[in-house]
Amino acid sequence: MTAHQAAQLAIPTTGYIRRFRLAEMLGVHVTTVDRWVREKRIPAPVKLGEKITAFDAVEINNWLAERRGKVA
């Protein structure tokens, strides 16, 4: 993986992340993200419009930090 590719997959610290991009960033399939949401294992996405939902980047980063703390 090049530095450019890694930068593209870096999780932003602000804004919103669409579910297909989140799945790509986490290295999982979109259906895995959907399952995690149903199981309340990941912060729920927010509705941004009639047909647009996305994950809050701050919540995702907090969730990742919490998970890293449990693993360490």
Image (cartoon, grey):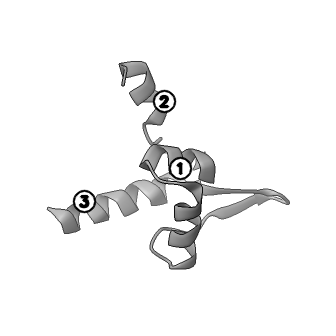
Q: Which residue is mark 1?
A: 22
Residue found at the far bottom of this picture: 39
For the question of whether residue 71 can be seen, the reply is yes
Say whether residue 5 is left or right of residue 17.
left
Q: Quadrant of the C terminus?
A: bottom left
- Residue tagged by mark 2? 8
- Provide residue 54's location: percent of width, then percent of height: 65, 55
Dot 3 amino acid type: Arg
Residue type beneath disc 2: Gln
* Residue 24 at x, y percent in the picture: 51, 44
* Depicted 35 relative to depicted 58: above or below: below
**What residue do we see at 58% from left, 56% from top?**
30
Q: Position of residue 5 (x, y in %)?
A: 44, 25
Q: Residue at x 51, y 68 (%)?
A: 43
Residue at figure coordinates x 52%, y 63% from the top left: 32
- On screen, residue 70 versus residue 63, left or right, reads left
